[in-house]
Amino acid sequence: MDLFDLTGKVALVTGGSHGLGMAIAKGLAKAGARIAFNDILEDRLRDAADEYRRTGVTARAYRFDVTKEREVIEYVAKIEKDVGPIDILVNNAGIIKRIPMLDMSVADFEEVVRIDLVAPFIMAKHVVKSMLARGRGGKIINMCSMMSELGRDTVGAYAAAKGGLKMLTKNMATEWAKHDVQANGIGPGYFATSQTAPIRVGGHPFNEFILNRTPAGRWGDPDDLQGAAIFLASRASDFVNGQIIYVDGGILATIGKPRGE
Ligand code: NAP
Ligand code: GCO
């Protein structure tokens, strides 16, 4: 089990104040990692710090915007001073806008791509620079999606960003594997978080669709991602490069089945 031990490691999880990021951070902490996380809203950070403390996780909160390179440079340095050199970066922060492309503004499209694709590049660039300056390797985990592989009405910008993030992950692996930095992705299926609440709760028809479309017959629980995250953050994945691990209850394995079957 030492292969999965993260004792002494520092993990930075972007957007770790709730949802999948918080679940992944708690999982990495369970394996021994020290956690730093960020968000853009102060009150979210405060509530999250209380939640981490309540569950026995020591996590340091930082308020910065992952799309602002100047803030990223400043806060990567601050985190490394406060908590220690970053060994594991989880590019989790992300948004979605559900708008048909013919109605979507260029500004909306660009905002989704900026947060979901450009920001992981900015974050990884500065965390990896620091890893290399110290002659250390490290782990990059990018949060991909079903939309890294599939399209869906109204999520064109998000699919473009998450499809791009899959390929960016492969390029990170290509350029940085020789420095003992492993870059991989996690592709969650459909998970019960605030991001999917608008299409999951209140009798939304998409809920029924996903229950039927997912062979496991349920929405993902954020804790379902902890195993893949610990694997990709640990020595167990030292020869795994540019892979996306899909944690999707079987969605990508099937074309689905008629309703009611
Ligand atoms: P979520 O609940 O919306 O959480 C996203 C987090 O990112 C929030 O903490 C948000 O902060 C933060 N964030 C957004 N923009 C930011 C910025 N510019 N700088 C710093 N932080 C920022 O989403 P989730 O469902 O947990 O998903 C997390 C990641 O997994 C996302 O990348 C998402 O695309 C991906 N994903 C989700 C699912 C799913 O089914 N839920 C499936 C596949 C992939 P605020 O709360 O303050 O806005
Ligand atoms: C949507 C959902 C999805 C999930 C996730 C699936 O509107 O289709 O929000 O995009 O967030 O990315 O893997």
Image (cartoon, rainbow, N blue to C red):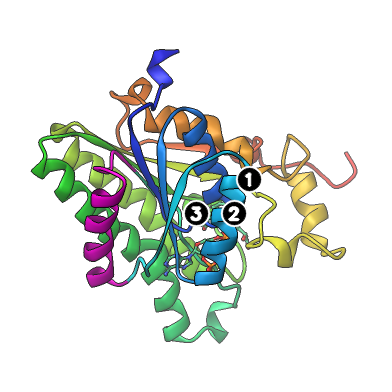
**Residue at figure coordinates x 82%, y 45% from the top left:** 258
Q: Is residue 82 in the magenta section?
A: yes
Residue at x-position 42% and y-position 85%: 107
Which amino acid is tagged 2? Asp
The residue beneath circle 3 is: 16
Give the position of the N terminus as an image quadrant. top left
The answer to whether residue 18 shows anywhere in this view is: no
Q: Which region is colored magenta? A: 68-88
Looking at the picture, tell me which residue is in the foreground, 83 or 132.
Answer: 83
**For residue 235, side relative to residue 216 (left or right):** left
Asked whether residue 31 is in view, the answer is yes
For mark 1, give the secondary structure: helix
Which of the labelled discs sits on residue 54, or is there none?
1
- The C terminus appears in which quarter of the rendering? top right
Q: Is residue 128 above or below residue 242?
A: below
Residue type at mark 3 is: Gly
Residue 179 appears at what percent x and percent y?
14, 34
Select label 1 or label 3 by which is in front. 1
Q: Residues within 10 Å of mark 2 (few under 14, many from 20)?
A: some
Res 151 quadrant in image: bottom right
Of pointers 3 and 2, the one earlier in the residue sequence: 3
Q: Position of residue 159 (x, y in %)?
A: 49, 61
